Image: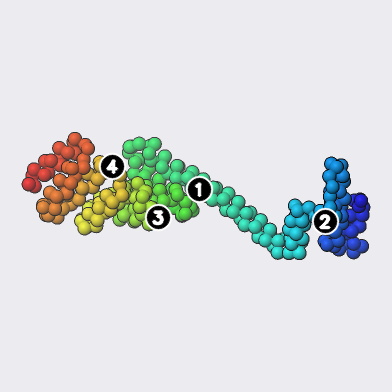
Amino acid sequence: MCGNDELDSRFHGNDNVVYVSTFYEAVNIEITHKRKEIFVAKGKKITRKELKQPDQFHSVAARVFQYIYENRQKFYLASGIAGLIVLLLVVWGLYHLNYERNANLMYSLAYNSYTLAGVSDDEIKTYEAAVKIYEELINKYPKSDAAKLAFYNTGNIYYSLYDVDKSIEAYGNFLKKSSKYNMLTSLAYYGLGYCYEDKKDFEKAIESFENSNENIEGLHFASMNYANIARIYEKMGKDKKALEFYKKALEQTPDPLIEALVRNKVATLS
């Protein structure tokens, strides 16, 4: 029976060259002897063919190992590429987490600066300071989720500061980045409707309120949009269209106060 020294001598040449076939020949001899010993110990007869037949698992493993050995350069390259891809994914994941975290910190700083401050004599200055932080956030982290929200909030702030053009620009930037299924998308269109109404661009105002109604949830918002559209048609002198949308608002509103106001409008225009 072959010992470890004999296997090593068959596996390693004088020039450190691996002779794979010789190695497997030695291992097969070793396994054959082992199998013979096992069958003899159990008192079973074994044919010469069965004795020489290689172990199935070993044969498969040997072929796999030999294939890998013969194609080792390709495997080294594939392993290196796979390792590099994993490393890049890990680095990107860590970068993205840090990117979003820093953006969220700036967003919280801006949002809290005016929502927690409340109404005061310095309200305008508070809003202006918040806008600066939002704009810095947008410039530093333009691809973050916080940047999208910053555009929306900036639109609200500019409208509160009576800067309608900048409000329209901010809402527009938010809508370019947001999904139609986002609740804030409907509210951004709602804000745009008021902006265009203030500019007396009534057609765009109506279009904005209609867009707001397309994917907004809740009867309350639908009734408000219908009432807004009706009000604009009334300003345009289109009483028939105004009456049509006031009636739609009346059908949708769950608010008794709004219902009373809309009923009064319907009665006036009927």
Q: Which residue is at 47% across, 51% downward?
A: 144
Nearer to us of marks 1 and 2 is 2
Q: Nearer the viewer, residue 140 or 90?
A: 90
What is the residue that sits farthest to the top in this orientation? 256
User: If you read the primary sequence from the N terminus, does the residue marked by circle 1 or circle 2 appear first?
Assistant: 2
User: If you read the primary sequence from the N terminus, does the residue marked by circle 2 or circle 3 appear first?
Assistant: 2
Nearer to us of marks 2 and 3 is 2
On the image, the x and y values in percent for residue 8 come to 89, 55
Q: How many marks?
A: 4
Q: Which residue is mark 1?
A: 100
User: If you read the primary sequence from the N terminus, does the residue marked by circle 1 or circle 4 appear first?
Assistant: 1
**Gap between marks 1 and 2, in whole Å?**
69 Å
On the image, the x and y values in percent for residue 188 come to 32, 50
Q: Which residue is mark 4?
A: 218
Res. 64 image quadrant: bottom right
* Crowd around label 2: few <14 · some 14–19 · many ≥20 (10 Å): few
* Crowd around label 1: few <14 · some 14–19 · many ≥20 (10 Å): some
Dot 4 lies on which element?
loop
Q: Which residue is at 28% across, 51% downward?
A: 214
Is there any visible trace of residue 136 in the rendered image? no
Q: Which residue is mark 3?
A: 177
Contact? badges 3 and 4 (CB < 8 Å): no
Q: Which residue is mark 2?
A: 49
* Crowd around label 3: few <14 · some 14–19 · many ≥20 (10 Å): some
